[in-house]
Amino acid sequence: MLVGLKDVINMAEKGGFAIPAFNVYNIETVMGVAKAAEELKAPIIIQVYPRLINEEVGYYLCPSIVAAARKASVPVCFHLDHGPSEFTVQRALRWGATGIMYDGSVHSFEENVEMTKHIVDICSAVDIGVEGELGHIGSVNDDSMDEFTNPQQAGEFVKKTGVTCLAVLIGNAHGHYKKPPKLDIERVKAIREATGDIPLVLHGGSGISDDQVKMAIKSGIRKMNIATDICCAFANTTKEVLNDTERSIAIDLFMKQPIESVKKFAMEKIKLVGADGKA
């Protein structure tokens, strides 16, 4: 059930829910999110940060994601998250990605449009959808946040680039929030109206309150990224298992609990965004 970005985004748009997009870092996190999707009969996106694509680990990790997707009985898209360059995009495509995000938000509006359109043209040749970004989504550790996504500018961006979906800045950020964020839900509605109801993407999903997530989805968010909390679910349980172990044990044995923790956490997010039972 390896499917494209367009397929899962269309499912979410028609069903009025959001696709959970889980960043993975090793085989164990792949297994955890895949098992969660299977158990809840949910379509998901498994995505990889460009650092992993550009380093040796991606060579081994990407085939594992593709294998997990093909084995699954539910739709799974393999997505590049925050692709910064054509090189990274091309490598992700060669390694099996069925969805691409090109992030040109650090550039001027004109440069972002030009490069995103270029990536859309490349991916269109192999019928793969592209996620763009307008309004730079930074880190919770940044001193200040960039200006929120402008609805009118978003309409122009979507028209000129032909992206499948659009990541927006509405009060969200990457990482663990220092204080609960307040999303600009009215801006989500305005962006949808200005873009002809393009599916929108919420980055920084780790730590946003459940009620705000639900309001955002109701207003047009169709993909929500979860990365930091996946890392924490895996790492915290690994530490606990190792600390409780009095003697050396086989890695595959003590990894069973971290995999289960990732699965349990992923199931919570799948239910939150309304993707359970939608496959």
Image (cartoon, helix red, strand yellow):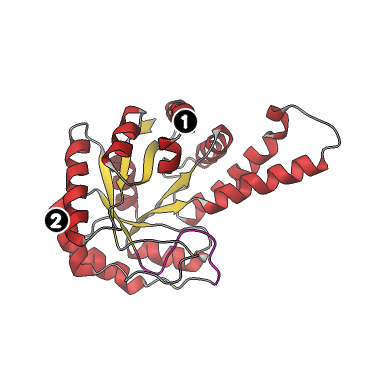
Amino acid on which disc 2 is placed: Lys
Of helix, strand and loop, which mostly describes the magenta segment?
loop
Can you identify the residue that label 2 sits on? Answer: 159
User: In the rendered image, is residue 200 in sight?
Assistant: yes
User: For the residue labelled by badge 1, is the local secondary structure a helix, a strand or a loop?
Assistant: loop
Asked if disc 2 and disc 1 are in contact, CB closer than 8 Å, the reply is no
User: For the residue labelled by badge 2, is the local secondary structure a helix, a strand or a loop?
Assistant: helix
Mark number displayed over residue 259: none
Can you identify the residue that label 1 sits on? Answer: 56
Amino acid on which disc 1 is placed: Glu
Residue 21 position within the rendered picture, expressed as x and y whole percent measured from the top left: 43, 47
Q: Is residue 173 above or below residue 37?
A: below
What's the magenta region?
169-179
Q: Residues within 10 Å of mark 2 (few under 14, many from 20)?
A: few
Examine the image and state in which quarter residue 50 appears. top left
Q: Give the alpha-carbon distance from disc 2 to disc 1, as whole Å.
A: 37 Å
Residue furthest right as drawn: 246
Q: Is residue 141 above or below residue 273?
A: below
Give the left or right position of residue 193, taking residue 24 as reference.
left
Residue at the (39%, 30%) spot, across then down? 1
Residue 204 position within the rendered picture, expressed as x and y whole percent measured from the top left: 45, 58
